[in-house]
Image: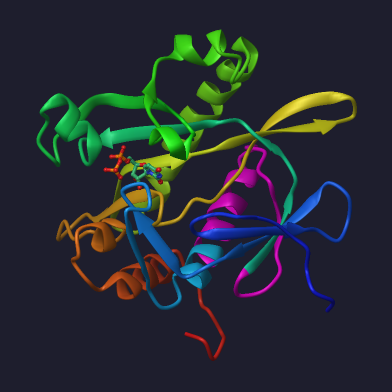
Amino acid sequence: MSALEKLYEGKAKILYKGPKPGTLIQYFKDDATAFNAQKKGTFANKGLLNNYISEVIMGYLEKIGIPTHLIERIDDRQQLIRQVEIIPLEIIVRNIAAGSICTRLGLTEGDPLPRPLIEFCYKEDALNDPLIAEEHIVTFGWATEDELATIFELTQRINDFLCGLFAAIGIQLVDFKLEYGRREQDGDIHVILADEISPDNCRLWDIKTGEKMDKDRFRRDLGGETEAYTEVARRLGITIATENT
Ligand code: UDP
């Protein structure tokens, strides 16, 4: 295959020009960052595991009618995706208190929240992705009222579905982050799910032991990152038949 044209390199992924207009190739790296890239590292097979895990989860979401950017996984490291204009929001869904909300509001990690909570951050590394209110989103034109309504509806459905999916494999879905994008189709603009869903952007706790099976192992120097991501993949029924694993 001829060299791919790199369009963008992020902290964990690289985007290349796709084979057809309106498509991109998303490449998953082993690089890990935390605390807005102040902590950097890498762990074996992270990209490969996230690629497979995100493929399976987005595949399930498509089956329940959630539009996503995923077209297909190409190989161990790459996915063919639909090109979107990323909406500059990080949508955080929380079922149980953990991470930044604990420090911000004085909650204890592990406390169940009275109901699922959706928070928004403005996706801007230079500002450290600040927490924002819904009002900011429409006021500054980051999304329209209609797009925001769609984002709420899709996000609630995704949370309901993923809580059940993970509970069935003995994992508690504590919180996660979503990103959406705009895509033009038949003259209309649609909001579709973008980015990835993986242990990089979810907090996943083993229901029986409470053990962390996500990027907090890296953030908090707990070790065993590859083993934890591999176990999430295994419980999702993913078998990776490559010599890389
Ligand atoms: N998250 C993410 N990217 C970010 C910020 C958060 O994927 O830039 C995910 C994170 O993995 C967790 C959830 O969103 O599952 C909530 O993160 P939180 O706000 O608690 O921030 P953190 O404690 O990770 O800094």
The chosen color scheme is rainbow
Residue found at x 43% / y 44%? 162
Residue found at x 52% / y 72%? 48
**Is 212 placed left or right of 72 in the picture?**
left
Question: Total marks drawn?
Answer: 0
Residue at far bottom of view? 243
| Relative vertical location of residue 64 with respect to residue 76 in this rendering, above or below | above
* Residue 167 shows in this picture: no
Q: Indicate the position of residue 70 as horizontal and vertical percent values.
A: 68, 52
Q: Indicate the position of residue 53 as horizontal and vertical percent values.
A: 50, 62
| Relative vertical location of residue 106 with respect to residue 225 in this rendering, above or below | above
Task: Tell which quarter ligand 1 is in.
Answer: top left
**Is 28 placed left or right of 198 in the picture?**
right
Residue found at x 49% / y 37%? 158
Is residue 167 in the magenta section?
no
Q: Indicate the position of residue 18 as horizontal and vertical percent values.
A: 80, 58
* Residue 217 shows in this picture: yes
Residue found at x 49% / y 56%? 11
Is residue 62 in the magenta section?
yes
Return the residue nearer the eye: 158 or 184: 184
Return the residue nearer the eye: 182 or 174: 182
| Relative vertical location of residue 3 with respect to residue 217 in this rendering, above or below | below
Q: Indicate the position of residue 91 as horizontal and vertical percent values.
A: 45, 32
Question: Range of the magenta residues?
Answer: 52-77
**Quadrant that contains the N terminus:** bottom right
